Amino acid sequence: MKFIDTHKHPDAVLEEVERIVERIKPLLAGKPPNVQGLILADLTALWISHHLVATAKQDEQIALWGEILKMHTDKVWDLIVLYGEAHEQ
Protein backbone atom coordinates (compact mmCIF):
# COMPACT_ATOMS: atom_id res chain seq x y z
CA MET A 1 0.00 0.00 0.00
CA LYS A 2 1.34 3.38 -1.00
CA PHE A 3 1.31 6.18 1.61
CA ILE A 4 0.15 9.56 0.32
CA ASP A 5 1.44 12.48 2.38
CA THR A 6 -1.66 14.59 3.09
CA HIS A 7 0.43 17.71 3.65
CA LYS A 8 2.45 17.48 0.45
CA HIS A 9 -0.34 16.14 -1.79
CA PRO A 10 -3.75 17.16 -0.37
CA ASP A 11 -5.46 16.99 -3.77
CA ALA A 12 -4.17 13.46 -4.40
CA VAL A 13 -5.45 12.35 -1.01
CA LEU A 14 -8.90 13.84 -1.60
CA GLU A 15 -9.10 12.21 -5.04
CA GLU A 16 -8.15 8.84 -3.55
CA VAL A 17 -10.72 9.24 -0.78
CA GLU A 18 -13.45 10.20 -3.26
CA ARG A 19 -12.68 7.16 -5.45
CA ILE A 20 -12.83 4.78 -2.49
CA VAL A 21 -15.98 6.35 -1.01
CA GLU A 22 -17.74 5.99 -4.37
CA ARG A 23 -16.81 2.28 -4.40
CA ILE A 24 -18.08 1.76 -0.83
CA LYS A 25 -21.40 3.64 -1.18
CA PRO A 26 -23.15 0.84 -3.13
CA LEU A 27 -22.18 -1.66 -0.43
CA LEU A 28 -23.98 0.43 2.22
CA ALA A 29 -26.90 1.58 0.06
CA GLY A 30 -30.24 0.15 1.12
CA LYS A 31 -28.93 -1.20 4.41
CA PRO A 32 -30.71 -0.05 7.59
CA PRO A 33 -29.01 2.89 9.33
CA ASN A 34 -28.06 0.74 12.34
CA VAL A 35 -26.30 -1.77 10.06
CA GLN A 36 -24.50 1.04 8.21
CA GLY A 37 -23.42 2.54 11.54
CA LEU A 38 -22.14 -0.78 12.87
CA ILE A 39 -20.16 -1.38 9.68
CA LEU A 40 -18.52 2.04 9.97
CA ALA A 41 -17.91 1.54 13.70
CA ASP A 42 -16.27 -1.83 13.05
CA LEU A 43 -14.03 -0.40 10.34
CA THR A 44 -13.10 2.54 12.57
CA ALA A 45 -12.26 0.24 15.48
CA LEU A 46 -10.09 -1.94 13.23
CA TRP A 47 -8.32 1.11 11.84
CA ILE A 48 -7.63 2.67 15.25
CA SER A 49 -6.62 -0.58 16.94
CA HIS A 50 -3.90 -1.09 14.34
CA HIS A 51 -2.15 2.10 15.44
CA LEU A 52 0.34 0.43 17.75
CA VAL A 53 3.43 1.77 19.45
CA ALA A 54 5.83 -1.06 20.25
CA THR A 55 7.31 0.70 23.27
CA ALA A 56 4.00 1.93 24.74
CA LYS A 57 2.59 0.52 27.94
CA GLN A 58 -1.04 -0.59 27.79
CA ASP A 59 -2.39 2.61 29.37
CA GLU A 60 -0.31 4.72 26.97
CA GLN A 61 -1.60 2.70 24.02
CA ILE A 62 -5.19 3.16 25.16
CA ALA A 63 -4.59 6.92 25.55
CA LEU A 64 -3.18 7.04 22.00
CA TRP A 65 -6.26 5.26 20.66
CA GLY A 66 -8.42 7.80 22.49
CA GLU A 67 -6.53 10.68 20.89
CA ILE A 68 -6.90 9.13 17.42
CA LEU A 69 -10.64 8.59 18.00
CA LYS A 70 -11.04 12.21 19.15
CA MET A 71 -9.26 13.54 16.04
CA HIS A 72 -11.37 11.26 13.86
CA THR A 73 -14.61 12.29 15.57
CA ASP A 74 -13.69 15.96 15.15
CA LYS A 75 -13.14 15.43 11.41
CA VAL A 76 -16.43 13.51 11.10
CA TRP A 77 -18.25 16.40 12.81
CA ASP A 78 -16.63 18.92 10.44
CA LEU A 79 -17.83 16.86 7.48
CA ILE A 80 -21.37 16.54 8.91
CA VAL A 81 -21.58 20.33 9.19
CA LEU A 82 -20.13 20.79 5.69
CA TYR A 83 -22.53 18.30 4.09
CA GLY A 84 -25.46 19.66 6.10
CA GLU A 85 -24.77 23.18 4.87
CA ALA A 86 -24.47 21.93 1.29
CA HIS A 87 -27.92 20.27 1.53
CA GLU A 88 -29.49 23.49 2.80
CA GLN A 89 -28.44 25.41 -0.32
Image (tube, rainbow, N blue to C red):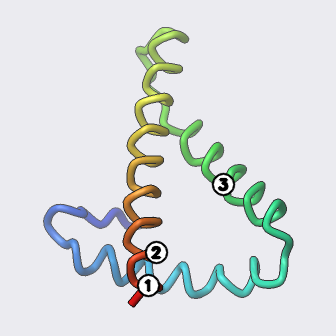
Disc 1, disc 2: CB below 8 Å? yes
Question: Relative to 26, is 50 above or below?
Answer: above
Image coords of residue 17 (percent x, y): 43, 76
Determine which residue is flagged by label 3: 43
Nearest-to-viewer mark from 1 and 2: 1
Determine which residue is flagged by label 1: 88
Mark 1 and mark 2: Cα distance apart in space: 6 Å
Determine which residue is flagged by label 2: 84
Question: Relative to 47, is 81 above or below?
Answer: below
Image coords of residue 51 (percent x, y): 48, 37
Nearest-to-viewer mark from 3 and 2: 2
Q: Secondary structure at mark 3?
A: helix
**Residue located at (53% from left, 20% from top):** 62
Identify residue type, mark 3: Leu
Camera-nearest residue between 68 and 8: 68
**Residue located at (73% from left, 59% from top):** 37
Identify residue type, mark 1: Glu
Camera-nearest residue between 68 and 12: 68
| Residue 42 as seen in the image, left or right of residue 83 | right
| Residue 15 as seen in the image, left or right of residue 44 | left
N-term-proximal mark, 1 vs 3: 3
Identify residue type, mark 2: Gly
Image coords of residue 3 (percent x, y): 34, 62
Disc 1, disc 3: CB below 8 Å? no
Determine which of the numbered discs, if any, sits on residue 72 in the image. Answer: none
Nearest-to-viewer mark from 1 and 3: 1
Q: Secondary structure at mark 1?
A: helix
Image coords of residue 28 (percent x, y): 75, 77
